[in-house]
Image (tube, coloured by chain):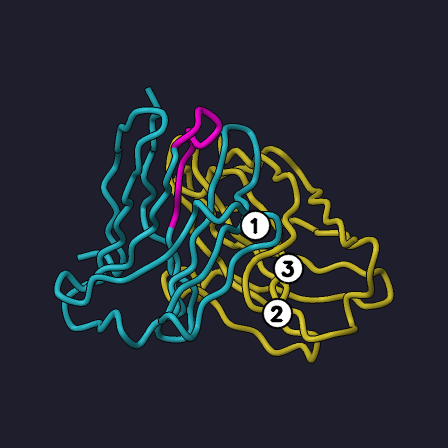
Chain colours: A cyan, B yellow
Amino acid sequence: QAVLTQPASLSASPGASASLTCTLRSGINVGSYRIYWYQQKPGSPPQYLLRYKSDSDKQQGSGVPSRFSGSKDASANAGILLISGLQSEDEADYYCMIWHSSAWVFGGGTKLTVL
Amino acid sequence: QVQLQESGPGLVKPSQTLSLTCTVSGGSISSGTYYWSWIRQPAGKGLEWIGRIYTSGSTNYNPSLKSRVTISVDTSKNQFSLKLSSVTAADTAVYYCATQDDYFDYWGQGTLVTVSS
């Protein structure tokens, strides 16, 4: 089982909100981790969005709009990237990442379609 | 602003060693508290962290690749390098170099390496 699992795809309408999940493998407690989120558009390297561990330990990337936010669902053992007020430019691949067992681990990514 | 540029052969034969270099400009590779990483992405697939080197020379590697990976730094040239041995078609990917303090903030544009005879 992968360390981080993300849904392969998600669709949402312009103006709506999208909740992208990053589920940690059983036995790995989401509460212990900073979860980093990146956005990648075709032909470009990923760009850092934000990291979230708790409301007192979070950081927004430089220039990243406040409509991108992070949270956690402890009951689901998952990190969440919430994008509100979806715009066409938000259509991209989104990756979560954690530092686990002395290595950076990426989720498989979610392709967000805005239509 | 720091800029990174990957360079190296775009085609490598199976069983040979893949060698790439990342040239850093706009800042010194030996200053600050940065880690210097390699990350790869097969076409149409997700990101995979390969490993990193600190300014002190200490390294961390992805356990799944550790036996085949060496990352080194040349401070005189402001470069760091990746060597991946015994490559197969599964190593075909876009290879990125990136720098990290807390998060990966600066990335190269990536270079495609194809493993084929």
Kindly indicate whether the residues beneath marks 3 and 2 are on one polypeptide chain: yes
Q: Is residue A90 above or below residue B73?
A: above
Q: Which residue is disc 3 drawn over?
A: B99
Q: Which residue is disc 1 drawn over?
A: B17
- Dot 2 surroundings within 10 Å: few (below 14), some, or many (20 or more)? many
Please identify, in this view, whether the residue under mark 1 or under mark 2 is nearer the observer. Answer: 2
Marks 3 and 1, the one that precedes in the sequence = 1
Q: What is the secondary structure assignment of the residue under circle 2? A: strand
Where residue B57 appears, as percent x and y from the top left, is 67, 77
Where residue B64 appears, as percent x and y from the top left, is 36, 61
The three-letter code of the residue at mark 1 reads Thr
Q: Which residue is disc 2 drawn over?
A: B53
Magenta stretch, residue numbers: A86-95
Q: In this view, does A16 lie above or below A37?
A: above
Quarter occupied by residue A90? top left
Residue A15 among magenta residues:
no
